[in-house]
Image (cartoon, rainbow, N blue to C red):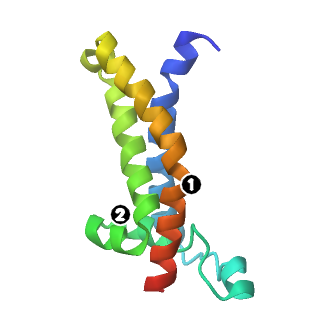
Amino acid sequence: MTVAARSGTPILFGALAVAAVAGSAILDALGLTFGECPFAAIIGLPCPTCFTTRAFLALGRGDVAGAFAVQPLAVSTVILLVLWGIASAAPALRTVSDRARALVRQGRRILLVALPALVALNWLYLVLHD
């Protein structure tokens, strides 16, 4: 993959995050819903992504605190993707020092290790607050 193709990736992910929130609001306005989660229907517990649509609807209304209360991991992910896209689109922010690049690489490694724990903690939160 070329450098030019990679540099557009954050902008694409940021745009997709915004589109997911907007799409949820549009589906809600049209009265279209997804129904009950199959995992929750069979197991009796919410899945790790349960309530994401509700969280996106709250974000669409500007209720960030309410969205976090419903699905903290999905909301955090959307906000980070949007910020990543904005930062990548801003030319002044594209030129970063070697130290900053090293911190980003280290952050990626930490995220890869921490991601399963974040998903598990989010799932525990959803189970306890269901």
Q: Mark 2: which secondary structure?
A: helix
Disc 2 to disc 1, how far (Cα)?
24 Å
Work out whether residue 9 or residue 120 is closer to the camera in this orientation and state it: 120
Tell me if mark 1 has few (under 14), some (14-19) or many (20+) residues whose alpha carbon lies within 10 angstroms of its own.
few
- In the picture, the quarter occupied by the N terminus is top right
Residue at 27% over, 20% down? 93
Q: Is residue 128 visible?
A: yes
- Residue assigned mark 1: 116
Amino acid residing under circle 2:
Leu
Whether 94 is drawn above or below 39: the answer is: above
99 horizontally vs 6: left or right: left
Residue 17 x, y percent position in the rendering: 47, 48
- Residue assigned mark 2: 59
Write down the quadrant of residue 125 in the picture. Answer: bottom left
Work out whether residue 46 or residue 102 is closer to the camera in this orientation and state it: 102
Residue 21 x, y percent position in the rendering: 45, 58
Write down the quadrant of residue 87 in the picture. Answer: top left
Q: Nearer the viewer, mark 2 or mark 1?
A: 1
Residue at 41% over, 34% down? 107
Res 36 label: none
Residue at 59% over, 75% down? 32
Whether 17 is drawn above or below 7: the answer is: below
Q: How many marks?
A: 2
Q: Mark 1: which secondary structure?
A: helix
Residue 81 x, y percent position in the rendering: 42, 42
Residue 4 x, y percent position in the rendering: 53, 12
Work out whether residue 22 or residue 37 is closer to the camera in this orientation and state it: 37
Q: Is residue 23 visible?
A: no
Amino acid residing under circle 1:
Pro
129 horizontally vs 35: left or right: left
Whether 36 is drawn above or below 110: the answer is: below
